[in-house]
Image (cartoon, rainbow, N blue to C red):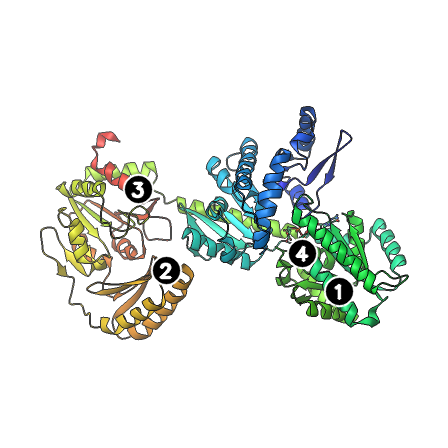
Amino acid sequence: MFIVSNRLPINVIKISDKLSYCPSVGGLATGLASFSSAYKSQWIGWPGIADDEITKRQKQQIIHDLHQKNCFPVFLSRQEVEDFYEGFCNKTIWPLFHYFPLYTVYEDSFWQAYKRINHYFCDIIVQTAKPDDCIWIHDYQLMLLPELVRKKLPHAKIGFFLHIPFPSFELFRILPWREEILHGLLGADLIGFHTYDYVRHFLSSACRILGLDHSMGSLTIANRIVKVDAFPMGIDYERYSGAVHKPKVQKNLTAIRKKVGDRKIIVSIDRLDYTKGIVQRLEAFRLFLRDNPRYKEKVTLILLAVPSRTGVDDYQALRQQLEGLVGRINGEHGTIGWVPVWYLYRAVPFEKLISLYHVADVALITPLRDGMNLIAKEFIATKTDGTGVLILSEMAGAASELGEAIIINANDKESVAHAIKQALEMPLDEQIQRNHFMQQRLSRYNVTRWAHDFIDMLTEVKKVQQRISVHKLTAPRLKKLTLDYHQSENRLLLLDYDGTLVSFADRPERAGPDNELLTLLEQLAHDRRNNLVIISGRDKNTLEHWLGSLGASLIAEHGAWIREKNHPWKVIELLQDDWKATIRPILELYSDRTPGSAIEEKNFSLVWHFRRSDPELAYIRSQELKDTILNFTTNLNIGVYEGSKIIEVKNIHINKGRAAQIWLANQNLDFILAAGDDYTDEDLFSALPNSAYSIKIGYSISHAKFNLDSVQDFRLLLQNLINKPENF
Ligand code: GDG
């Protein structure tokens, strides 16, 4: 198992030419460290020191030392760190994905660096991993990596987890490199997010930008299933709750209490980041002090801002703004002997962090956007006596799991100020009751459970992929099919047209067959041993126009019309079409209300096409339309069928299987091949005898015996049949 993240869990530091190693801080590193050691996984990432700052010997030393700890470093130059990490990651993706488009910088050199560094990571993976290893890639710095690794190690189990929000389509579409990012992510077998909202946003972008539909969170990419799901990240609960009893923590607790006296303590702890809403939070505290003067000298806000991304201008400006505001609040409200806000700008050791959580009466955690927020969970875990109140922003992913906290809108100063008062005055038994539920949940769904869930799901997706590939028409099966074909004298070939012989991706829907296809079909039709039947949902005039002179039999409108070779068209049975007058106005209404959609009228069916419409609107409309029509069709002998971007209304007696009976009834057939790609072909597959070869183009659930990847592959198969047997 490989864990791949921007930073290794170990940071290399150089002080006066001497190297030392210390654990990395940050949600990802702290969260995954325990899981990684339990799994004995290898970790690939940047060691935190730029290439230019170390000698060649030191580099070798770092590689050696990190290998001992199962870590494989990816080295970056100072310039690369600037363009990739501070640039594309933290000036482009971070602000955009946290809904700060005005902070977002679009700079091609940053993008070039992002691509290059993702390639570096890929190189190290390829050098280190075996072809079918499990590779778990993390976070927004490495969104191109799944696809890069997939190209090099096609059989690897690749998982990707995003630790920050995935923004709504309206935000994501702003990114000039949106297609590349989506393609990059879709190289994974499983893509995980903290919450279902982010899953929805991702699926909506995949649909609107790449035209990819999903079914229950599964997408099919080049015949590979990719699953997208929510896995809310947990914490190492025991580590946080257990730490409270450590002597060092107890000593800190006594020291803090001695300094604060019997004042209430509110803590605010985050990396110094504009997404964390620290300034807005301070403003709310200021308002609270103004509106509740009786709390003066009775409450202290300990504000720990952990330095972060100090090389990025916006972060420097934020620090200044924050420090100015702290000064103003202390100046306005402080008294001799009472400083309302204790401001600390530094990272603190783990034990100090635990002491701060445990000593606090209230934790004020009010990000404007946050993928999850582990601080909120850690705070709850350290409340071993059950007391303490969490005030949490609804914009943190954690809010969906921590519903017993006081949930606020971080932009609403008044309500945050009110929440502070409510928290300070909350009866102890209510605090204990609320925390009890959250503690139960957090101790159950901890970080190990989260990671196992993710890996289990990844394994499951891989199994599904394998089950599907079991039916693939592999070379030996193809050989057998070809031999059977050449040894037979009376063959039936039932071939669907759209999606089987031609693909929409290669050719416009109305363009008709290309010359290569016409030649192929002509050759098949001219072999006297073949009964070639093209079986399509198209109307009869189109089929006649395109394929009428081939010498093949034709079936149009899914079986309503039949034209046996050298015979005129005939209707399969006496079909009614008077229902069309009732249904047509309904379709017209939906067509008017759904831009880009259109109605096609065939002799015995009406089709509503919505391939060119906004996918989400079209989906809603198509479901409404289906329901509406079903109400009308109860006594009409007609059915409503959902195909690929179409709703078709037709006589229930029409289907391809029924139409094919005319040929299948022939007892002398010694070879049958049927091929199709969508739901209408399933009736055909079910109607075939056991000895027939049935092939589904694509990989969804089917009655067909075999699957092939693409139209291209199916044409190749037909070409093989035409070739002489000795060519195999
Ligand atoms: C990203 C997403 C998501 C913080 N200061 C100190 C310290 N920490 C540790 C905390 C906690 C972690 O850092 C911070 O995690 P968060 O989740 O709060 O925030 P991000 O760093 O922004 O993390 C976030 C997370 O990834 C995981 O997916 O939840 O939404 O933005 O574990 O304990 N640790 C120590 N000293 C400090 O001063 N020792």
Q: Quadrant of residue 541?
A: bottom left
Q: Earlier in the sequence, mark 1 or mark 2?
A: 1
Q: CA distance from mark 4 to mark 3?
A: 51 Å
Q: Amino acid at mark 2?
A: Ser
The numbered disc on residue 97 is none
Residue 3 position in % (x across, y down):
60, 41
Q: CA distance from mark 4 to mark 2?
A: 38 Å
Quadrant of the rendering where the N terminus is positioned = top right
Question: Is the Cβ of the residue at disc 1 closer than 8 Å to that at disc 2?
Answer: no
Q: Nearer the viewer, mark 2 or mark 3?
A: 2
Residue 354 position in % (x across, y down):
78, 53
**Residue 196 shown left or right of residue 523 in the figure:** right
Read off the residue under disc 3.
712
- Assign a secondary structure to mark 3: helix
Quadrant of the rendering where the C terminus is positioned = top left
The numbered disc on residue 276 is 4
Q: Amino acid at mark 4?
A: Lys
Within 10 Å of disc 2 (Cα), the crowding (few <14, some 14-19, many 20+) is: some
Read off the residue under disc 1.
285
Read off the residue under disc 2.
613
- Front-most of 87 and 687? 87
Q: CA distance from mark 2 to mark 3?
A: 27 Å
- Assign a secondary structure to mark 4: helix
